[in-house]
Amino acid sequence: MMEKKIDELLKKNHLSVTGGRKKILELFLQQEGALSHSDIERKAGEKFDRVTVYRTLQVFLEKGLIHSIPTSDNSIRYALCKEDCSGGHHHDDHVHFICNTCGNTVCLEGVSIPAIRLPRGYSADQVEMLVSGVCKSCNI
Amino acid sequence: MMEKKIDELLKKNHLSVTGGRKKILELFLQQEGALSHSDIERKAGEKFDRVTVYRTLQVFLEKGLIHSIPTSDNSIRYALCKEDCSGGHHHDDHVHFICNTCGNTVCLEGVSIPAIRLPRGYSADQVEMLVSGVCKSCNI
DNA sequence: AAATTATTTGCAACATTGTTGTATTTTTGT
DNA sequence: ACAAAAATACAACAATGTTGCAAATAATTT
Ligand SMILES: [Mn+2]
Ligand SMILES: [Mn+2]
Ligand SMILES: [Zn+2]
Ligand SMILES: [Zn+2]
């Protein structure tokens, strides 16, 4: 039963369990890849107000339930955090892949972001690595 | 004289030289870092229609005059291509840095993106690497 | 279990950002 | 200087994101 898991996830993150949050979390759990705001609006049907989706995603981000993935087309994607992340502190050192064929965005959990040497004076907080190309399913 | 350089840049890319294009190109040449659409609107004053800025950026992208830099906050930045890039074919294998203090985005031309091994089945077209932290100017 | 309190939601109103079509203006090539 | 081609402004619109607040719902206390 997924219902249980969802409830626990919300409670573990000190969030009150509501219809909207359950539904959105369910979407993430069903989905292999990442979701954009508009994906969620679409998949959730007419059930929730747009504003609720915005606020839910924001609170999920803050609590470390999801992380955001920047893209080149001005449409942030969101994906579930696998490990235990908390507000601001995401252990999110994996590469993200965007398929130019199917449009899917996935977390490549197995591919970690290599270290780089920054020029003198620069200090790094966070590193994102974003690969686009053709995904496993679309490569023949 | 920068005027000359701008004219040549436009002509080299088979673009008719117009007031708007000259102004926007000038902004890029003056600027150390990258510019967002709204930066450009603001810096160009009330001189140009918003639509013109959109279309100019698009044509600059297509011609390989500028490249786009994805960000986590849904606001694509644009920066001049240093090398000779042409439509679609950008030789843009450097890391981008976003300063959390001053907000500037810069191309780290000297820092190239390390190669990674993708899982079987995935093929890469383009790789972006985006580091956020504190830049040279803001570090003390 | 009911009441109280705290939190979330929907709605409305608005701001910002991005898109498209078209008439006018400007640039280019002759 | 002229004709053809291209760029621009303007208008109208669509999509996306933000804020305040009243009503609804969830959590907590009695
Ligand atoms: Mn991820
Ligand atoms: Mn760059
Ligand atoms: Zn694919
Ligand atoms: Zn800085």
Image (cartoon, coloured by chain):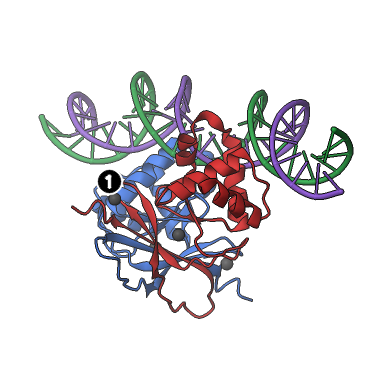
Chain colours: A blue, B red, C purple, D green
* Residue nearest the viewer, comparing A23 with B47: B47
Task: Give the SS element for disc 1.
Answer: loop
Question: Where D9 falls versus A99 (above or below)?
Answer: above
Pinpoint residue D18: horizontal percent, then vertical percent. Answer: 39, 34
In the rendered image, the quadrant that contains the C terminus of chain A is bottom right
Task: Answer yes or no: is residue A48 visible.
Answer: no
* Residue nearest the viewer, comparing B50 with A46: B50
Residue sitting at x 64%, y 41%: B18
Residue sitting at x 49%, y 50%: A75
Graded by Cα atoms within 10 Å as few (under 14), some (14 to 19) or many (20 or more), the crowding at tag 1 reads: some
In the rendered image, the quadrant that contains the N terminus of chain A is bottom left
Pinpoint residue B74: horizontal percent, then vertical percent. Answer: 44, 47
Pinpoint residue A82: horizontal percent, then vertical percent. Answer: 34, 64
Question: Where C23 falls versus B82 (above or below)?
Answer: above
- Say whether residue A61 is left or right of residue A99: left
- Say whether residue B109 is left or right of residue A121: right
Chain of the residue displaying label 1: A
Question: Where B15 falls versus C14 (above or below)?
Answer: below
* Residue nearest the viewer, comparing A115 with A45: A115
Residue sitting at x 49%, y 42%: B37
Q: Amino acid at mark 1?
A: Leu
Task: Answer yes or no: is residue B79 visible.
Answer: yes
Residue identified by numbered label 1: A15
